[in-house]
Image: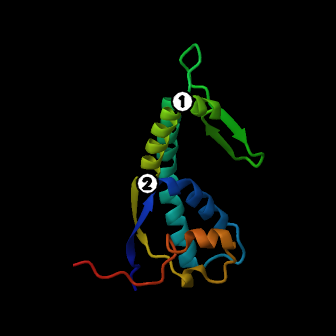
Amino acid sequence: MSDIVIQTELKLGMVPSLHQDLLAVFPLQPPPSARGKWIFAKYAQAIASELPKYIEHKHDLLRKYAPKDEKAEPILVVTDFGNGQSQVSIPTDHFKAHPEIQAAFVKEDLELSNTPLVLNLPQLTHTDLGACPIPQGVYTRLLGVLIKDEIPPENG
């Protein structure tokens, strides 16, 4: 039986959280079925290849709208969450002082986040998950996005 390849339509803004969700599945025991592991790896590889593009575009957007110092370098706030994760943002007082800049930033950020991303990969079903104990939050985010049981209509 050949694998059903489907077009998975995502938004570019989903890439960072999907990347984390997919990585969370690999150490789980029992793991997904052999086919499930293979498909998760395919999705993880595809999402990981999109992540640097998203991060670069996001950083360009932050640099564009951030206030500048005397050397014309952007002034950004880095929040360290203490778990190896951090977030870069524009100082809130800049947006409070310049609501028109905030509106322009939000508009472009939404456009970036809503940029379509189409992946052509094998269909992942509940059967592929096997007895893998995927955490409820991860499962909920993947359901309907990557995990689909319906058979797609034939093209043509």
Check the picture and name the quadrant holding the C terminus. bottom left
**Disc 1 to disc 2, C-alpha distance:** 25 Å
Instruction: Check disc 1 and report the residue beneath it.
Output: 98
- For label 2, the residue is 114
Q: Quadrant of residue 29?
A: bottom right
- 57 sits left or right of 126 in the view: left
Name the side, left or right, on which 117 lies relative to 139: left
Please provide percent x and percent y for residue 89.
Answer: 61, 37
Please identify the quadrant where the N terminus is shown.
Answer: bottom left
Query: What is the secondary structure assignment of the residue under circle 2?
Result: loop
Packing grade of label 2 (10 A; few <14, some 14-19, many >=20) is: some
Q: Residue furthest right?
A: 82
Q: Are marks 1 and 2 in contact (CB under 8 Å)?
A: no
- Image quarter of residue 130: bottom right
Tag 1: residue type? His
Q: Is residue 118 left or right of residue 37?
A: left
Residue drawn at the location 38% of the way across and 74% of the way down: 5
Callout 2 amino acid: Asn
Q: Quadrant of residue 24?
A: bottom right
Up-down relation of residue 74 to residue 51 (above or below):
above
Q: State the residue at coordinates (62%, 73%).
A: 139
Mark in front: 1 vs 2: 1
Q: Nearer the viewer, residue 30 or 106?
A: 106
